[in-house]
Image (spheres, rainbow, N blue to C red):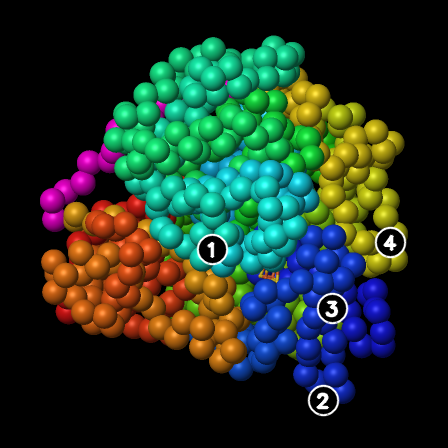
Amino acid sequence: TEETSQKTTRTTCPYCGVGCGVLATRHEDGTVTVAGDPEHPSNFGRLCSKGSALGETLSLDDRLLYPEVSGKRSDWESALDLVAYRFTQAIRENGPDSVAFYVSGQILTEDYYVANKLMKGFIGSANIDTNSRLCMASSVAGHRRAFGADTVPGTYEDLELADLVVLVGSNLAWCHPVLFQRLEAAKAANPAMRVVVVDPRRTATCSIADLHLALKPDSDVALFNGLLAFLAEAAALDRNYINRFTEGFDKAVEAAGPCAIGEIAEKTGLSRQDIALFYKMVARTEKTVTVYSQGVNQSVVGTDKVNAIINTHLATGRIGRPGMGPFSVTGQPNAMGGREVGGLANMLAGHMALEDPHHRQLVREFWKSPVVADKQGLKAVELFQAVRSGRIKALWIMATSPVDSLPDADGVAEALRACPFVVVSDVTRSADTVPYADVLLPAAAWGEKDGTVTNSERRISRQRRFLDLPRDVRPDWWQMAEVARKMGHGEAFAYQTPAAIFREHAALSGYRNGGTRDFDIGAYGDASDTTYDTFPPFQWPQAVDGSAAETRFFAEGGFFTEGRKGRFVPVACQPPRKRERAYPFVLNTGRVRDQWHTMTRTGKTPRLTSHIAEPFAEIHPRDAARLDIQPADLMRVKSPFGSVDVRALITERVREGEVYVPMHWTDRFASCARIDAVVAPDTDPHSGQPGLKFTPVAVSKL
Ligand code: SF4
């Protein structure tokens, strides 16, 4: 590994999609301290509260440290023999679509690559999906509709170079803190910069907002369709860009309708003045970046929201140039890396398209595989519904806890109870999914494993090992390669190191590419082990001949659609969703500043748990008064799927008629606080992403 001194290792933070570089120093007494890596171009030495507490989260106290079968200690040979046998048996008796993998944006690109290759190329099913489906699937679908590929056009630097940054459904201050720090510093240095926050809640991010648009949940399409119409009516379009590089503008404008501010105010719940002010700011500011995150993606209309935003950038030609562009920030550390290897049920490796016969042929040829799945697999929510209905006979869950994090989480628990064979690979024993495993496989944790991750600006960084692997713990890629070998595919999975996997992944990305696909890191296809160990963070593409090396996309067209034109996607504003009288509130869920996902790591350090010690529900003062709820009273939030009992936090941060509950607390940390047991399993029809921010609920005082 690359060492800056005898015991300091250069690695990457395992939490959010900012992907900060970290210097981890192992001391003689076994403790580890961390600091931001000043040479990493995504964070330049900065870390947030979570990242800086990483050294305090490395204890072995709740770790899975040996394989278990049916609750009893086992050994790797026996456990993996059983996994291979049960998967082979299910495939033989019920076909390849009777098995599934459910993986995670927490695993490394090399792990993801092996999982995807095994399922799509050797088992012959596309039933591999990931918790990244909960994170950014709507952005992927929106990118593919508009750009012909899942391409993020810009870089973090664009937020600093912009004169107007519009943050939509993004609490950047808490969810991507270092990127927020960069934006905050840029705003301080450029007093002319304006920041607009579009979010139903008044979040910490509003501390730097010049304008906060607290719109009704899921009314974003109305706001951005109105903006497109306004730009057209105000002649604030880039006609040259539209004519030369795009198609479908007229239909998109027609779908958006006229810019009737009164109607938009009605649909969004915003004032006419604020809407007009926002539209004028955008029309007048060339250097505009629109950042969007889970408030956009986690919606049953998430893909349409993404395209409504992208339409406004295509219409103004503000894309791929410094300080301009639509910008999706992902939640997880490797949500992007997973996309690159095709870790979603509707994608193929190397950003290739599962539905494209040429791409399937190309991947099959490269892998020398017997088959390549030719139809989409089951996406996360439908996958667990298929488990529940008995269609899935063998399931392997890796580095995620669906019993805590999927909507209708109690339904997921029921599905796992009914599933004939469940394998769970994880680091921790404390996830609520662990008790449902027939086979438990102990996985390598952050600091113990080696590989790569890709952050939200397409930057690939190394995660490096600086701790010894506990004796009976193994990396995820090794577990899957061993099972592949036991299933008869040894030759194609004879990897000895993550470097070998990365080389294959890189070579596939450049294989017969020639600039026809966005993702290309072919230049690393023959990287030596030493190069792999020492390579600095880099952005893709990195084609073999260097021809495609660029940090931004689409300033001069060059989209990845058939005609190489960017596509306007006509999107219609959906009428408000019908709600039963018994469930008059809208439940919104999200993060708090100092916790990560289900707290299996961040919950270990008092420094982080002291920020917010217990789960809560934010409720507006007028709603609280109506329900006789006092501050810190226990209140119940209930849907047809389940309920939680949490303390009331009475605040005007939320809109009247809405409640906000954080996603982190599981049964391990608090009883009756697993909020995803309350969330409805409704999904976006294009992306399959669940609407985690809109569930009709009832609220009462306990
Ligand atoms: Fe880690 Fe994200 Fe914080 Fe950076 S901003 S230190 S990647 S959690």
The alpha-carbon separation of the residues under discs 1 and 2 comes to 41 Å
Give, as a three-letter code, the residue at label 3. Leu
The alpha-carbon separation of the residues under discs 3 and 4 comes to 19 Å
Disc with the residue nearer the chain's start (2 vs 4): 2
Label 2 secondary element: loop
Instruction: Please state the horizontal and vertical placement of residue 327, each as a whole percent of the image.
Output: 57, 39
Q: Magenta segment range?
A: 567-582
What residue is disc 3 on?
A: 23
What residue is disc 2 on?
A: 29
Give, as a three-letter code, the residue at label 1. Ser
Instruction: Please state the horizontal and vertical placement of residue 247, each as a whole percent of the image.
Output: 56, 13
Disc with the residue nearer the chain's start (1 vs 3): 3
**On the rendered image, what quadrant is the N terminus found in?**
bottom right
The alpha-carbon separation of the residues under discs 2 and 4 comes to 31 Å
Write the residue at 12% across / 58% down: 626
Q: Looking at this view, is 494 or 290 the one in front? A: 290
Mark toward the viewer: 1 or 3: 1
